[in-house]
Structure formats: structure tokens, C-alpha cells
Image (cartoon, helix red, strand yellow):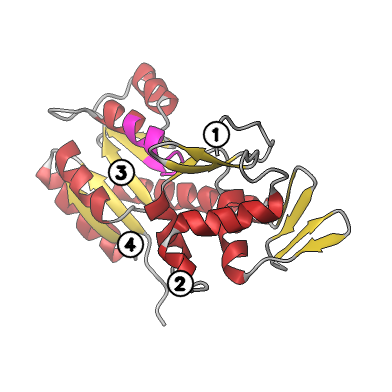
Amino acid sequence: MDERKPMIYVVDDDPGIRELLSEYLAGQGFDVACAEGAVALDALLEKSRPDLLVLDLMMPGEDGLSIARRLKGQAATLPVIMLSAKGEDIDRIIGLEVGADDYLPKPFNPRELLARIRAVLRRGAAAAGEAAEALKTAEFGPFRINLDARLLSRGEQEVELTSGEFSLLEIFVTHPNRALSRDWLMDQLRGFERDPFDRSIDVRVNRLRKKIEEDPSNPRYIKTVWGQGYLFAPQGKASSGP
């Protein structure tokens, strides 16, 4: 099976630059999609998320700084390399402050951009590897979870979970302190244990609560966020509702 090619989105209002980078990066082993501005980029993002975004600073409509700030608020881990005809330090500093991972002034050599893309992707892969290593085990309250062994324990006692319950807990543990929608949770659970209860994520959450909460009717770890879904609070903050 062929290894998946990294996907790069190039956002620039200059059609010449879009064509140049599309052909060059494709020839270097990347999948490339181009957008002339924020609206076209948002349409691409609705379909899939790239591995890296090459983003022009100065564009009509929503500019690159605004786009970068907005996207970093939605997906902080999306790598961004910012391009700009402005080469002043202040523009570079502002770009980095809003979350860009690197900054390249125009005109630039495509080979330099390629080197920076590879460097940013390497840093991201290394960070992801470190995060994955750190998350092999995690603790919350009196519990300790081992993701490799798929084991939950309380002190020396193993807590028996079904495969589906463990998969749900794993999602919560790896996405702490974030409101996760019911639909998103079910999408992540596809391919795991399926039974009649899986028609409702609420039932599975309730089953899991009964095994980790002292008072499932007033949960401390898996909290309901009304109108959004569920939030896992590893610090065990008291919940105001079920």
C-alpha cells in the first residue's frame, strides 16, 4: 500500500504563484490544493484538513493574518507558513504572533519554501510522537489508564470495561477539557464495538459514568455541556448538572 502523501493547501490571490507552487510541490511528493482566498479555503477545509497551510499575508477580503488567527483558534495544531511581499520584521513578528509556524518574504525560491515545509512537518511529527508517548499512560482522580494495554485501574484493582467503553474513555482522555459533540464522538467510535446501545452515545456515556464516577448522577469527570455534548475534566471538577 502506498504511503499517504502530505496534503498542502496553498492560499494566494496570485494565480501565477498558485500554479507555480502547485506544480513544484506536487513534483516533490505532496498532494496540493489551491485557493485564491478565504472563501475558497473554507470550502476546502469543509472537505478535509491539510497537513500544512501555505498562506499569503496580503489578500483582498479576509487577509492572511485574520485567516491564521481564525484557523488557529479552531485547530491549534494546523501548521501555517505565511508568505508576504512585505519583508519587514514587524510583519514577520505579527505573523508569528498570530500562530504562523514560519514566515517567508516574497520573492522566494520554491526550494527554500520546500525546505521550510519539510522542517515544519518534521517538527510537527516529532511533537506528535512526544505527545503520543506521554499519553500512553494518564491519570485522573484515583484512576490510571494505559492506552497501549487498554487497561484502566483504580489503585491495584482493574476496572473492567468493554472494548467500546474503553474506546470512548480513550477519546475523552486524549481530548481533555474540550466540549465534544455527540455526532463527533460517534464518528470516532465507528469500527469499534457495536451493539444496540450504540444508537445513543448518551447510553454509552452513562455506562462509563457508572464505572468511574462516585455519583453518576452528578459526574465529576465526564460532564455534560448543554447544547454541545460532553467534556472530560481530568481534574475532577464538580459538575453543576448530570
The image shows residue 20 at horizontal and vertical percentages of: 18, 52
**For residue 77: magenta?**
yes
- Disc 2 and disc 4: Cα gap in Å? 42 Å
Classify 186 as above or below 212.
Answer: below
Q: Do labels 2 and 1 touch, CB within 8 Å?
A: no
Q: Secondary structure at mark 2?
A: helix
Image point (30%, 43%), residue name: 54
Q: Amino acid at mark 4?
A: Phe
| Pointer 1 residue | 241
- Disc 3 and disc 4: Cα gap in Å? 13 Å
| Pointer 2 residue | 196
Earlier sequence position, callout 2 versus callout 4: 4
Q: Do labels 3 and 4 touch, CB within 8 Å?
A: no
Earlier sequence position, callout 2 versus callout 1: 2
- Disc 2 and disc 1: Cα gap in Å? 26 Å
Which residue range is magenta in the image? Answer: 70-80
Please indicate, yes or no, whether residue 21 appears anywhere in the rendered image: no
Mark 1, residues whose alpha carbon is within 10 Å: few (<14), some, or many (≥20)?
few
Select label 1 or label 3 by which is in front.
1
- Disc 1 and disc 3: Cα gap in Å? 43 Å
Q: Residue 30: which disc?
A: 4
Q: Do labels 2 and 4 touch, CB within 8 Å?
A: no
Q: Secondary structure at mark 3?
A: strand
Left or right: residue 1 versus residue 147 is left
Q: Nearer the viewer, residue 22 or 115?
A: 22
Earlier sequence position, callout 3 versus callout 4: 4
Q: Nearer the viewer, residue 206 or 236?
A: 206
Q: Residue 173: which disc?
A: none
Q: Amino acid at mark 2?
A: Pro
Earlier sequence position, callout 1 versus callout 4: 4
Left or right: residue 188 versus residue 14 is right
Image point (34%, 21%), residue name: 91
